[in-house]
Image: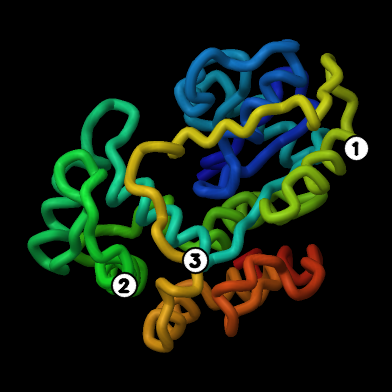
Amino acid sequence: MGFPGTWMTESESMVYRVVPKCACSTIGQIMYYSDHGEFFDGDIHDAKGGLHKWAHEASQDPISHAVKDHTSYAFTFVRNPYARILSSFFDKICGIQRNGKRYRGNLVPLLIQKYGIEVGGDDGKQEFDQIKSFRRFLLFARDTIRWRRPMDPDIHWSAMSGHVSTFIVNGGRYDDIFWTETFNDGMQKVLDKVDTKKSVDLGQIPRFNESEGHGPKRAHPVEDYFDDLSMHLVYEIYHRDFNLFKYDRDNPGNKMPVGEIDLDEVHAKLSD
């Protein structure tokens, strides 16, 4: 199976396991910049060169060797499950993607028909009941994850622990796992532990939020979208994420972690 979703600098200074909706665009651009002294012109997910990616066949041997021999610093970032699933809804379900179309073609019409959600009209900018539609989307996300119907779960709302685990199961070990909620602190620790070809001043790095502006703006605080039932559903779907990455399952309004990530625990529990 190898190391899907893994990126590495061409200099092999660092290896990053991408977790969707967890600042991956910004992290990829920082990695690119650390080798080349400039940012990739466009969405880093579209870059075909300048950064090793498992999806590129020529990158697979270098990534495999670096990960298995642990010659490169390996890390990833995670995010509060409540905020992450909400972000996925506004970006992927309500938003128009960068190709000018809806995400995954017939996905949104399917959700409108089978789950009765609204998405803000054809352009995603009309007013609608965001809370009601999000809670219906949550039922759909649960159905895809638990029963793989009406489709397989999408990478943007499948559990972070699932993404993180493939790296471990196939022979990798993380040096660190950080929270996006304290992004600068975590990313600075990465940069402090590696030798980069070009110096990176985090204070001067823009945020590359490629989903920004795709869809409607969130009209309410995070906690307003989650009632008792939806909190139960979120915990059912993401219990390993809450427990391993130390997020607060009882308070959707608290985006900050409530404990320290235990790397040994993460490797032990995600290794099978």
Left or right relative to 102: residue 47: right
Seen at 76% across and 25% down, the residue is 204
Three-letter code, disc 3 = Pro
Residue behind mark 3: 221
The answer to whether the residue labelled 2 contacts the one labelled 3, judged by CB atoms less than 8 Å apart, is no
Residue behind mark 1: 193
Say the numbered circle drawn on residue 135.
2
Left or right relative to 259: residue 38: left
Looking at the rendered structure, the secondary structure element under dot 3 is loop
Looking at the rendered structure, the secondary structure element under dot 1 is loop
Three-letter code, disc 2 = Arg
Q: Is residue 266 above or below residue 119?
A: below
| Frontmost residue, 239 versus 201 | 201
| Frontmost residue, 174 versus 248 | 248
Specify the quadrant of the image occupied by residue 11.
Answer: top right
Pick whichever of labels 2 and 3 is earlier in the sequence.
2
Three-letter code, disc 1 = Lys
Looking at the rendered structure, the secondary structure element under dot 2 is helix
